Amino acid sequence: MGPILKLIIIGVLCFVVVVLAIVLALVWTMPDLPEIVNNDKICLPSDKGILGCGNTPDLIHNYLERITAEKYDKIKKEDEERQQKYLNENRLRLMAIYDKYFWEMKPAAKLTGKEQPKQNKESHAEMTPIRVWRHGRELYNTSGFELYGVRYRNGRLVIPVSGTYFIYSYVDFFEPCVPSTGKPNVKNASIPIKHGIFKFNILDAEESELVSSVQPHTISINRYFNAYSSYVSTLAELKAGDEISVKVSNITYLKYTKFNYFGLNLV
């Protein structure tokens, strides 16, 4: 073996020894690393970025809950920003569409007259509700309708959404008279004939009059009967759930009900 080769081998061995010494020195001076998993213990970063250790199930549960909440908030915020951007870019077009359908879909109803059932006993109430109207399928081939959420319940119209409504009603009264005198066949002629629209809400537990019309009894020209027509209407602020009904002072006067009607519409 030549002297040059020996020098090369000795140089390589010295380099290896120096490298090993450096590695040992680094390992010796490095701080101890925490044990990440120790039986039922685990270490995970907290929301402040500090490594914390604790019971494995609890720590994993809290960690996943925090990460999931952060991701959900991020996705929700991005979705809200995307929706707002879309609304801002398409505001005029959306408003045009919304306004069009809003006007076309306002709650409205018109019930038409129907023959009233016979009264089992005489009512002593000042006003008697008209409990029977044509509604639902009975309105086919009539001028009546029920649109966009208005419901019918025992002669009443139930308001679907709060707002200002135009309410109206028309009835024909037929009053019998005494043929010998032509005077109305009533016990007390001083009490006028009355027709009105009333509001009831189960939460308020009381009924209130919205509009009414009164007319006095008159002596019949033909001595056999009097015919009266009554129309009432008004604007009213109504709440969702309000029930609107029509009442008359003497329901037996509703002899010819074909042309009677009762309705409302959101304005």
Image (cartoon, rainbow, N blue to C red):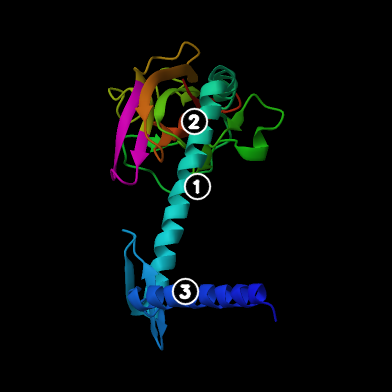
Query: Which residue is at a point 39% across and 61% down the rendered structure image?
Result: 66
Disc 3 element: helix
| Segment colored magenta | 199-212
* Mark sitting earlier along the chain (2/1): 1
Q: Residue furthest front?
A: 3
Query: Which residue is at a point 56% across and 78% down the rendered structure image?
Result: 13
For the residue pair 42 and 152, the one nearer the viewer reads as 42
Q: Give the alpha-carbon distance from disc 2 to disc 1, as whole Å.
A: 14 Å
The tag on residue 75 is 1
Packing grade of label 2 (10 A; few <14, some 14-19, many >=20) is: few
Query: Which residue is at a point 53% across and 76% down the rendered structure image?
Result: 16
The amino acid beneath tag 1 is Ile
Residue of label 3: 18
Against 119, is 247 above or below? above
- Residue 51 screen position, x and y as percent: 34, 68
For the residue pair 174 and 125, the one nearer the viewer reads as 125
Q: Give the alpha-carbon distance from disc 2 to disc 3, as whole Å.
A: 66 Å
The tag on residue 84 is 2
* Mark sitting earlier along the chain (3/1): 3
- Residue 178 screen position, x and y as percent: 43, 23
For the residue pair 224 and 94, the one nearer the viewer reads as 94
Q: Is the magenta stretch mostly helix, strand or loop?
A: strand
The amino acid beneath tag 2 is Gln
The tag on residue 12 is none
